[in-house]
Image (cartoon, rainbow, N blue to C red):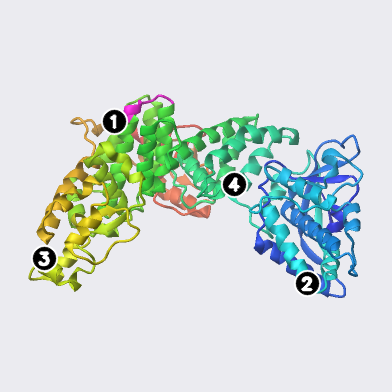
Amino acid sequence: MDANSRKILGLIAEMNTRFVVPVYQRPYSWGAEQCAQLWDDILATGRKPQGLHFTGSIVTIQDGQLSPAGVAPLLLIDGQQRITTITLLLAALVDYARKHDGRALAFSAEEILTSGYLTNHYRSGDDYYKLTLSKGDRDAYRHLIDAICAGNPPQLDPNSTLATNLAFFQRRIEALDDVNLVWRGMQRLEVVAISLAQGVDEPQVIFESMNATGKDLTNADLVRNFVLMSYPMGEQQELYRIYWAPIEQILSTDTIGFDEAFDDFIRSYLTVVHAPTSMAKVDVYQAFKRYVLFGGFNQNDRMKNLSLKLKRFARYYAAVTRGMLDDEELAQAFGRIAQLEAPVANPLLISLYDGYEHNEFGRSDFLRMLEAMESYLFRRRVCDCATSVLAPFFSSLIARVDAVRSEEGNVVEAFMAMLLNEDATPRRFPGDAEFAHALATRDATSLSDALYLLARIDENLEPTDALVLEKYLWTLEHVMPQRALEDDSWRAALGSDAERAFEECVNNLGNLTLTPHPFDLQEGSFEQKQARIAESPLALSNDVLSAGDWTPSRIRERAERLVQVALGVWRKPELPEGAGIAYRLSARAAATHKVTFDELFRAGLVQMDDALVSVSPLHPGKATVTSTGKIMLANGEMFSDPTEAYERFLTSQGATADGQSGWMYWRRGEGGPLLDDLRAELA
């Protein structure tokens, strides 16, 4: 590695070189904030009589051999955003100089165009362009440079980042009294130019550390670069096309940016492969990197296999979160779960989808499992069950169901039993009585899923017209209006204790329906409300339209009718008698909880000097069994209980001990059995 201080314009204009942004780099993405900062720095430097301004690092590595014309292509490992923006500013200066030919300027359009800042003036083809961007920016940038060199206005997509930033600099230059300040400031911009040697330096290590200025790298940037940089530069373009571009295409949407979607996807993927370890709070990139290194995916060309798996799981993720699959019925089932906005369930759903794709259960069984998940999530939402328990619970379900899959057991029966075996715990599947009571009595408008609740009930009442809900932008409508107490006729309908009756009824399920109007009419007579509701062709509203009046008793009666429908929509699964016992954790726990580590030692199942290995890829490490049957950590601390030892091991690693059972996280030797399996032999 060679590092030197260089003026950035001198570095860019160096003869017979050109900068190439690798295919795995993110597109040009500097916005107004970064451009404004660079502009301010340039002007501040230009106003000073002397001195340089340091503006970060430029990291390059030569991409193979010289071209036939003798031009050396340099891969930009770090610095593409800065160099691209500098060239846009240079293009804006060329445009200004041409438009103001009579002004006394310290630079000219001809000087910029022939000095190697934008082009290698006497070269052709790829060698002509001083900078080659990646992905969709490449052709647009070349068109921009061609137009500037020819003296024509560039015809760019006005919404593109290149066009936006060029226009930004053109406006700033036109508004400036002394444009020479810009030229003087640019002449004194300094960078640290770092040149890496192929086969010697590790570009990824440098890349990770060069993120102190500009726009922060995303996890998608870091993971993509980590995957593709593991291959020779000549293969990276093809690898990007085969593996990474499809992932970007699958995950990108009009409403959610790729970077945000990728973060959630990769966290979901890591949760699946690390189950039962929860991945909710980890650094996604560092966790992925450890997964690759500890799993040996960086060796023997296995990164391609991992990339194929990522592409497959990205397809699962798109199906689970957006219903992107050809099977309409499955897409609708995933869509209903997605409406509940419970991303904590995504890893479990992805894992189940993987089982379905591997023909471990049929389509009808998969639909049953998705229906059970929808019911589980919504019933818990209605009953105000704690959500904090779901991440570790779903992670444990992934591991437990996976164990059944590996043994070729009945995955569907196991999954249903595991959901149903949590009665009397914070993870319970609320029963019919609890669900019905909560739905009939609670403030239904406080549910974030109120529209979903009413829409699903309507679909069940009139399934032949289920798609009607997609034809309008529906809003929640109170039949008895929210200002009913201000109206004498409504007060009379509410009875002698109007205030109490109003509080009990106004937000009750029985008083709610859907209308296509953009707002809830908060006043008006019952007849006016009926006329408004009649505009919506929903079976949900039929009992409102047929009523002669609207009183608390009618609201309660309607609530009871809708609750009965809801019990059929969000059903609690049933299993044959005794079918769930085999999957009940408490049965084994009852048989094994009294077995101690000392008993394992005295039985010879663990022996002196045996290594106990942490199974967590996030927290690798070992402990040793002593001659007295204790567990000794690397720091010399000794414990009699595996869980206490593992909790202390985690804290010594700077991690949080969240109640992980040491019986499930220590195994005897590399690849050996879990301590939990060993104690089962003594149960």
Does the stretch in magenta take in 494? no
Residue range of the region highlighted in magenta in the rendering: 358-365
| Residue annotated with mark 4 | 220
Residue 602 in view, yes or no:
no
Q: Residue furthest left?
A: 496
Looking at the rendered structure, the kind of residue marked 3 is Ala
**Of 584 and 520, which appears nearest the observer?**
520
Please name whichever residue, 380 or 665, is drawn nearer the observer in this view of the structure. Answer: 380
Provide the residue designation for mark 3.
493
Above or below, 30 against 465 in this view is: below
In x, y percent, where is residue 149?
A: 84, 51
Asked if the residue under mark 3 is in contact with the one under mark 4, i.e. CB atoms within 8 Å, the reply is: no
Q: Which residue is mark 1?
A: 413
Which residue is label 2 attached to? 176
Q: Gap between marks 2 and 3, in whole Å?
A: 72 Å
When asked about the image quadrant of residue 432, the answer is top left
Closer to the chain start, of discs 1 and 3, is 1
Neighbor class of circle 4 (other Cα within 10 Å; few <14, some 14-19, many 20+) is many
Q: Earlier in the sequence, mark 2 or mark 1?
A: 2
